[in-house]
Image (spheres, helix red, strand yellow):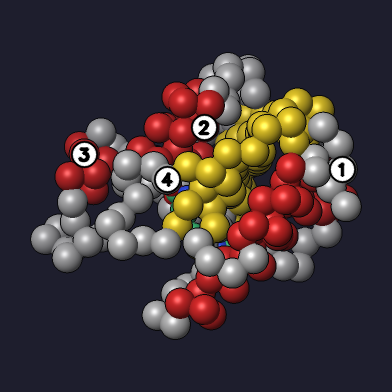
Amino acid sequence: MPRGDKWEDSYTRRARTEKWLARSVYKLEEMDKKFQLIRPGDCLLDLGCYPGSWSQYGIKRVGPKGNVVGMDLKNPDRLSAPNFKFIKADIFTVDPEWVLKEVGPRDAVISDLAPKTTGIPVADTSRSMELAKEALKIASAVLKKRGHFLCKVFEGGDLKSYRNSLSGCFDQVRNFRPSASRKGSREIYLLGLKFTGKSK
Ligand SMILES: C[S@@+](CC[C@H](N)C(=O)[O-])C[C@H]1O[C@@H](n2cnc3c(N)ncnc32)[C@H](O)[C@@H]1O
């Protein structure tokens, strides 16, 4: 993002100073601190990982005994680490069972997947929900028992029924709006804590 951009704020400046690839890292950091999502040695899957700040944070948190796999349409080319692997893929076309074979069982699946926004709220909300549903299918295929799932969605639409589907396969479900979410943004994060089994 160019300096002086209208989107620049204190989180953007802090991310630049602290050498994170995006300001969204502070959302994940806040949720990880609050809900203890990621532990040393964990295997993590990051859906919609470009430009890479969540994976970057994950790599730091899991340490050398853990690993992070990122998936996106775009290659996070500024990110490289021995325990990081990138899979270029469209979430709508990957088979969750193929993902499991490719990456192995995961302790946590984090999804910051977001559609290209059109400015038409109903269209953006519905596309975000489609992405969240695909993320849940993948999480259900790869998560270990008691693993965690974090997923961005835009408020509105069938959020309630999505939340219900999480309740069916996690011990606890939470909604959270991080401090770093931009004012006026419709994004919220849903957390499925302690995976209990396959979703229907
Ligand atoms: C908000 S960005 C993620 C930022 C990232 N968490 C970070 O901290 O660097 C959302 C990402 O979702 C990806 N995305 C959107 N639709 C996708 C799809 N169908 N398949 C895979 N990735 C997708 C976009 O390419 C974009 O990089």
Q: CA distance from mark 3 to mark 1?
A: 39 Å
119 lies above or below 181: below
Q: Which residue is mark 4?
A: 177
Does 93 sit left or right of 198 as displayed?
A: left
81 lies above or below 133: above
Residue 33: image x %, image y %? 45, 24
Q: Which residue is mark 1?
A: 198
SS under mark 4: loop
Establish whether ligand 1 lies closer than 8 Å to the Cβ of label 3: no
* Mark 1 or 4, nearer chain start: 4
Type of amino acid under label 2: Gly
Type of amino acid under label 1: Lys
123 lies above or below 143: below
* Mark 3 or 4, nearer chain start: 3
Q: CA distance from mark 1 to mark 4?
A: 26 Å
SS under mark 2: helix
Q: Nearer the viewer, mark 1 or mark 4?
A: 4
Q: Quadrant of the N terminus?
A: bottom left
**Residue in front for this viewpoint, 66 or 37:** 37
Q: Which residue is mark 2?
A: 58
Q: Nearer the viewer, mark 1 or mark 2?
A: 1
Q: CA distance from mark 3 to mark 2?
A: 18 Å
SS under mark 3: helix
Which residue: 76% across, 68% down?
93
Are there few (<14), some (14-19), or many (20+) residues within 10 Å of tag 3?
some
